[in-house]
Amino acid sequence: MPTEPSIASDEEFIQTVLKQVEEQLRRSLSEGKPQTLDEIEKEVGEIGAEITRALQAEKLRKRGNGYCGSFRGCSCGGSARFRGFFTRQVTTLHGRSGITRAYYYCPVCKAGLHPLDSDLGVADEGHSLGVRSLLARLSCYLPYRVAAKEAELLRNIELSHSTVQRVSLQAGEQLIRDWKQSQSDLWAERLPDPERRVFQLHLTSDGVMVNVGKEWREAKLGIAYERGACGGVERIGYYSTLANSSEFGKYWRTLGYKMGAGKCRQLAVVADGAEWIWMEVGKYFPTSIQILDYYHAVEHLWVLAHSYFGEGSKEAADWMERQKSLLLKDKIAEVIAEIGAWTFSSESKSAINQRELAYFRKHEHRMQYKTFRDKGLHIGSGVAEAGCKATVQARMKGTGMRWEHRGAEAMLKLRAAWCSEQNTDFADIIRRADNSA
Ligand SMILES: [Zn+2]
């Protein structure tokens, strides 16, 4: 009959630790030479760490070894037989500890059981929730290998980069499930509005190419934000995916509603001329104020100016100054009328003119820049461009960085979450991921 390892009584443990600490404290306080701040920091840290390690080991020991007789029931209905005690390492933020626990084997379903592991809630690799939250957080802004090294340097815990990758994937996939849930809640009109009433909300979107599965794929980024008092961004939310535009649109809508689009007084979409963006806007934000990014409009005017007046000419520059000021006065109709009256001897130039003319006619209602500005709206999609750099590019496009589809999709969700809210509760995400496994 196996016996439990002998457990010193609490009182014995306390007395042993107190004695050690007492000695350390006496030694520390009687230090003869004056210490620098750095020396004090190092010394007190070491004393604290020693107590923490001893207490962690003792508390784990007090959990016993999970032995509950020669047989125990298995979830398959069979009976698992005790096979012996085995030791494994568990890792918390305070370091590694060995735990010795009973092992049972079920001959019916051929499953091995460690009752203590389940009681302690030890995940497969024996990393605590604290460790895994830290890894998920680090992986948001560091390549897996660097994140593993940082964890080692910060917390003195040795981990492999594949552990970081697994934890990161687990957290990212939970966020994917969360988004799906929010999307279906919105569909069922169960998605709660934000607590604070939002007066004005901007929506914007852009794409950036990422190397996924040995090819370049577009990661689409959806943004919803509130403009701050000084014109910048006060509160921002991101959603990013490799999915196609119609799939993206559903989640962009979800993001918008999570950020307050449902009840806000002024909802505006500012974006470049990409056809797919306006299609999704038409589907999901039909009553929004639509704004074509002013700088894209100006670029298109430059194409015309070069074609009509000659590249680099003073006439082109002068004409552009006038058009820009017309645009900012809500006089896009005048601009269109002038371009429409131009005639060209060259067929290719005439084709450019027709193409650009069609562009301006199509987006005319999205170019009422004075009206938009008077409402306090952004007329440029700078937030989308900056967002692509900060959210996608900064983590997804390092030198030689290649992604598998699954990992990329998960990381895009993590990045979006972390860039939206740096206080993101990773422990909560991982706990939910464990529960849904
Ligand atoms: Zn079984």
Image (tube, helix red, strand yellow):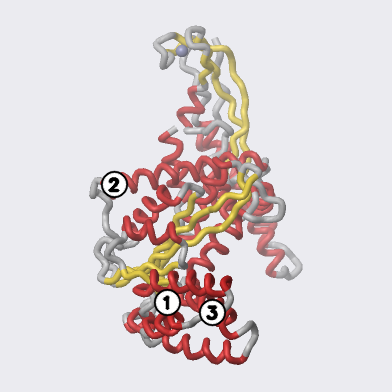
Give 347 or 242, whichever is nearer the viewer.
Answer: 347
Q: Earlier in the sequence, mark 1 or mark 3?
A: 3
Q: Which mark is residue 185?
A: 2
User: In the image, which is nearer the foreground, mark 1 or mark 3?
Assistant: 3
Q: Identify the element where label 1 is drawn.
A: loop
Residue type, mark 3 in image: Phe
Tally of numbered discs: 3
Residue at the (55%, 44%) spot, across then down: 168
At x 39%, y 51%, the residue is 251
**What residue is disc 3 on?**
344
- Say the numbered circle drawn on residue 269: none
Disc 2 residue lies near ligand 1 with CB under 8 A: no
326 or 118: nearer the eye?
326
- For residue 379, the mark is 1
Is residue 412 shown left or right of residue 401? Answer: left
Instruction: Give the amino acid type for the residue marked by disc 2 in the picture.
Output: Asp
Q: Residues within 10 Å of mark 3 (few under 14, many from 20)?
A: few
Element under disc 3: loop
Q: Position of residue 432 (x, y in %)?
A: 41, 41
Q: Residue at x 56, y 76 (%)?
A: 303
